[in-house]
Amino acid sequence: MSAPLLSTHGLQAFYGDFQALFGIDFEVAAGEVVALIGANGAGKSTLLNAIMGAIRVAPDMVRLDGAPTGGAAPHVMVAKGVGIVPEGRRLFTGMSVEDNLRVAIDHSAGGNDAWTLERVYALFPILKDKRRDLVQSLSGGQQQMVAVARALLNQPRVLLCDEISLGLAPKVINEIYAAIPSISDAGTAIVLVEQDVGLAKKASDRLYCMLEGKVTLTGKSADVSREDISAAYFGAGHAVA
Ligand SMILES: Nc1ncnc2c1ncn2[C@@H]1O[C@H](COP(=O)(O)OP(=O)(O)O)[C@@H](O)[C@H]1O
Ligand SMILES: [Mg+2]
């Protein structure tokens, strides 16, 4: 396999005195889709936020193209090509769909302009129909599409998605997940934090399972069994049938 685009090395993260991550080794290659699963509180969002620089970590614990980036600020990471669809979306709900997207264009790294308004509208046609509507008038699923589109307009080389299916109806989850292959086919690596194990397995090339701040399982998504995932997800002795 080619060298990883983004990787973490023995990554530890703290909230004050509380240690949330204990030596995470994680990697994703260009064009790869990697799922990150685990129960509530396992440390999935903390890992994404540590990669993004929203939580301070040592320089060598995060590398992009092999170069240390740990501790760089979030806007620096975005400029370097690491995009995030954050938990809770964080959109400007009192602004129109298109104005939300234009904010991302205005703040994009420049140079690489592979993702345009036209292309994100082709990916999510409903957003084109609703481009003049206020984000707050959209359904949860449509708002999530805006969040994904906004992240793409930053021209990410790797896109970190934090529970984009949370609270959405199956039909709209399918619509959003249907966009994943088109994004990765364009060469963008994708990290999917997902609580729905079946969905995560189906959508990804590889997966990592986390439990209590540690990686408890990693492998090709097609190869890992439900039993292995169950044990890694809940801990030894707590496996459910
Ligand atoms: N801002 C914070 N301050 C203190 N502890 C936090 C904070 N955010 C998360 N934690 C704790 O860190 C651990 C990992 O949380 P998180 O990364 O949000 O898990 P996940 O995304 O897998 O649900 C949990 O024990 C959680 O309570
Ligand atoms: Mg989380």
Image (cartoon, helix red, strand yellow):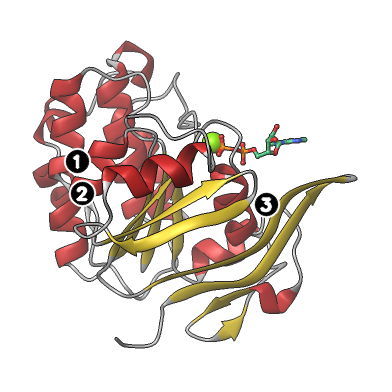
Amino acid bearing label 3 = Ala
Numbered disc 1: secondary structure: helix
Q: Earlier in the sequence, mark 3 or mark 1?
A: 3
Judge left or right: residue 205 versus residue 162.
Answer: left
Q: Please name the residue shown 69% across and 79% down the image.
A: 60
Q: Which residue is mark 2?
A: 203
Q: Earlier in the sequence, mark 3 or mark 2?
A: 3
Ligand 1: image quarter:
top right
Judge left or right: residue 72 versus residue 230.
Answer: right
Q: Earlier in the sequence, mark 1 or mark 2?
A: 1
Location of residue 210 in the rendering, given as x and y in whole percent from the top left corner: 52, 49
Judge left or right: residue 26 versus residue 213.
Answer: left
Location of residue 80 in the rendering, given as x and y in whole percent from the top left corner: 50, 72
Asked if the residue at tag 1 contacts the one at tag 3, i.e. Cβ–Cβ closer than 8 Å, the answer is no
Q: CA separation, marks 1 and 2?
A: 7 Å
Q: Say the numbered circle drawn on residue 177.
A: 1
Q: Say the numbered circle drawn on residue 209.
A: none
Determine whether the beta carbon of the residue marked 2 sits less than 8 angstroms from the nearest atom of ligand 2.
no
Foreground of the two, 153 or 1: 1
